[in-house]
Amino acid sequence: MRLFDESKPIFQQVAETICNDIISGVTPEGDQVPSTNEIAVFYRINPATAGKGLNLLVDRGILYKKRGIGMFVAEGARKQLLMEREDAFTHTQIKTFVSEAKSLGLDLETVRRLIEKEYNS
């Protein structure tokens, strides 16, 4: 994900980028994440903004601090993030999809067939 999506605050984009790296395995559990200053320099943003994004993940238990050393990916962070994304996917995409399918009069078998067709393409 690129930073500076006008629809979201930059600190949230910093946090999302780190989360994406954890989910994809680029930054595994136990690994150190870039420092506030490294993030600020890389994305050319204020260090306070970078720090706010990191602290957001500390508050959620995704990262933890080692005093004087840096921040690291917490044990179970990837699983937590995947569960959060699955829940969000269910509540936004799936519910909307099912509602639209019902309004179109599609039965469950037709919906399954359409999903399988798209999934396998």
Image (cartoon, helix red, strand yellow):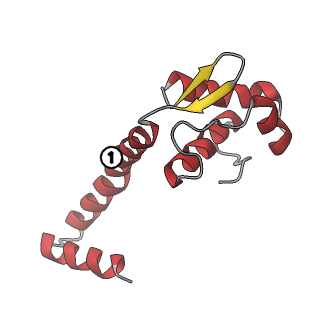
For residue 77, above or below residue 99: above
Q: Residue furthest top?
A: 67
Residue bearing the label numbered 1 = 91
Quadrant in the rendering for residue 69: top right
Q: Is residue 87 left or right of residue 70?
A: left
Residue sitting at 40 percent across and 46 percent down? 82
The residue drawn where x is 80% and y is 36% is: 38
**What is the x, y in percent for residue 58?**
56, 24
> Quick check: 91 left or right of 36?
left
Q: Say which residue appears at 45% left-offset and 33% top-offset.
A: 75
Work out whether 88 lies above or below 104: above
Residue 3, image x, y percentages: 72, 48
**Residue displayed at 50% across by 31% down:** 74
- Figure quadrant of the N terminus: bottom right
Q: How many marks?
A: 1
- Give the left or right position of residue 111, taking residue 82 as reference: left
The crowd level at tag 1 (other Cα within 10 Å; few <14, some 14-19, many 20+) is few
Left or right: residue 63 versus residue 32 is left
35 vs 121, nearest the viewer: 35
Rendered location of residue 93, percent (x, y)? 36, 56
From the top left corner, tell me how far across and down residue 100 is, in percent: 28, 63
Q: Amino acid at mark 1?
A: His
